[in-house]
Image: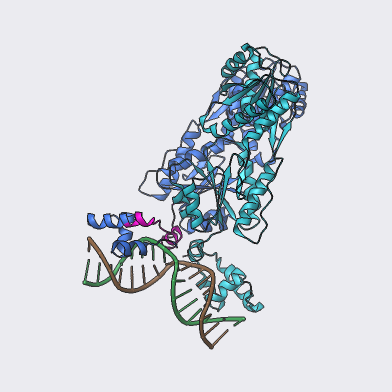
Chain colours: A blue, B cyan, C green, D brown
Amino acid sequence: MRVTSADVARESGVSRTTVSYVLNEKPGVVITDATRRRVLDAANRLGYTPSAAARALRSGRSDLVLCVVPDWTIGPLLDTLIDHVTMSLAQHGLSVLVHIDRGSRPLAELWRAVTPCAVLGLSPFDAADARAMARAGIAVIGSALDEDPHPETFVVPQQAIGRLQVEHLVSRGHRAVAYAAPADDRLAAFADRRLAGVRHECARLGLPAPRLARVDLTVESAVAAVRAWREAGEPVTAVAAYNDEVALAVLAGAAAEGLDVPGDLAVIGVDDIPVARLAVPALTTVWQAIDAQADYLAGSVLAALDPSLEPPARPDDVFHVLERAST
Amino acid sequence: MRVTSADVARESGVSRTTVSYVLNEKPGVVITDATRRRVLDAANRLGYTPSAAARALRSGRSDLVLCVVPDWTIGPLLDTLIDHVTMSLAQHGLSVLVHIDRGSRPLAELWRAVTPCAVLGLSPFDAADARAMARAGIAVIGSALDEDPHPETFVVPQQAIGRLQVEHLVSRGHRAVAYAAPADDRLAAFADRRLAGVRHECARLGLPAPRLARVDLTVESAVAAVRAWREAGEPVTAVAAYNDEVALAVLAGAAAEGLDVPGDLAVIGVDDIPVARLAVPALTTVWQAIDAQADYLAGSVLAALDPSLEPPARPDDVFHVLERAST
DNA sequence: CTGAAAGCGCTTACAG
DNA sequence: CTGAAAGCGCTTACAG
């Protein structure tokens, strides 16, 4: 049978009220040391752990943070981010629970089932969902892929990535730029915005509009793209790839076509996956300050939970070009 | 204010009992169609969703499955596995919640807070934890990295991977085999077992004991390893790498040393990460049947929850050599 | 076919 | 400093 606070009360000869006060270290209530000791001992002896369900029912709150992750195949960066956030929040007594949302069950069912104190969305929430959660007293920290004025929002401006890639390529003397988009449609929300950044920066700098090709993670696909780019009126000399994997495909395509990188074709990726460093030539890429972003996220949760806390400052400068041999 | 079943009862002019019966489709209870309709309508109109906390308190059970993931940097395979399990269980009304366990908070606190109906461990549980959960009526599905006779255990025999690698290399005519171990200590549980498999198979086939080197994900590290292997009395001609990333490092090291792959040195990885296909030469690797493993896992959860269900058969043949150009 | 009532385990005014 | 009691929202015997 489950050990309840009543058992602890009986065992230590006090009321449940006192047990609750002692165990929760209720501020403002003074308990004699002897009593406290007796309660703590009894709780220990009995192996008492409070029922979270009862607690949640009573207070309408838990110490769970629900982190909703969309069906992205973003990979290691996301894992690292979640890992960091989990660690940070654990230090404040909060447990992060990750749920991969593929839309098979409505989000509403989930957060009601978990009764979290906060919900962290790593992709934008449906407005109705967000409202419903807020109405239920849950702290909602949403996300956006574009600049967003709303302070409690996690923003990773994807356009900036594309801009940065072009800026770097141009600094290396290139003018004819191509964008290598991923084949997986689930990535479109990211890919389209990064492409927009590329386009924007090209226009701003007076370069020809970027050529575009979808590249899946096969050599053939990359070869086809590389050929098309090279055959253009003004042949492409530099490629901004959606991410490192796509960039590695382009590298493989260029090698298969006998092109020299970066002599004939420069390539820049995004993410700095471990393997990027191992490519021949080593891949130039855009690195993200995941730690800073994780800290911001954790801080936002904490601030949303405790209004007396200063909300964290949005990290700027979260992107950085890591120059290696491929550009 | 929260909408409760009492509100629905009032709105539809029935008792809470009836509301509960209708909403839970209680078997054996017959409700007139008109009543059912009224209740459903009212629930809808009011936007009623049951309080999971109250339900959990009442029944001591939720429809949450807690999946505890250790602090591995295993990457995409794990993501895929969890994704599949989440999907499968969602079809049975269960929501999977993933928690990365880095030991900062005791597991006991977490499962008590979540009140899951089942806990899925992707690494072995502490025996005391497992007992406590079982005592609390939670279905426990543990994991093991070695053969394990316990039926409700998820086993991915790591040794088999090493054996398979050697078997393949030998089939290509090699005798002098090396093992490229990862530098990250968190991977030791896997790496050591795979190495044991390599050793075992070498011994069984009468080959020299495998040479061993740690390779981190840099070219320099791989170059050092490759040099050491080539300088040996009987130079190594084939490398079984811990995983694809390490294998790609070895490939880079071999290239830097001017070695021909697979002519001078054959390399086989594990995982079939997308980039493996893009390597030059394309990387031979050991592929895992993640889907089958996910199905087994989901089936185990379901079977543990409902004794009338047949427990799933353990998938065999979950590993498979994917032969490409590097061997 | 439907309702009144108990109880899951907790916290917290409210009294002493 | 401590206790008796209410109530969070649900489900389920038990009566009708």
Please tell me which residue is depicted at 51% across the width and 30% down the height of the picture: B185
Please tell me which residue is depicted at 64% across the width and 42% down the height of the picture: B80
Which quarter of the figure has residue A207? top right
Q: Which x, y percent locates residue A281?
A: 64, 18
On screen, residue D4 versus residue D12, left or right, reads: left
On screen, residue A104 versus residue A313, left or right, reads: right
Q: Does the segment drawn in magenta span residue A146?
A: no
Q: Nearer the viewer, residue C2 or B244?
A: B244
Q: Which residues are magenta?
A: A42-64
Q: Does the segment drawn in magenta span residue A47?
A: yes
Above or below B273: residue A277? above
Above or below B208: residue B195? below
Q: Nearer the viewer, residue A33 or A227?
A: A33
User: Can residue A12 be spotted in the picture?
Assistant: yes
Considering the image in quadrants, where does the C terminus of chain B appear? Answer: top right
Q: Nearer the viewer, residue B58 or B168?
A: B168
Please tell me which residue is depicted at 59% across the width and 69% down the height of the picture: B23
Q: Which x, y percent locates residue A115?
A: 49, 57
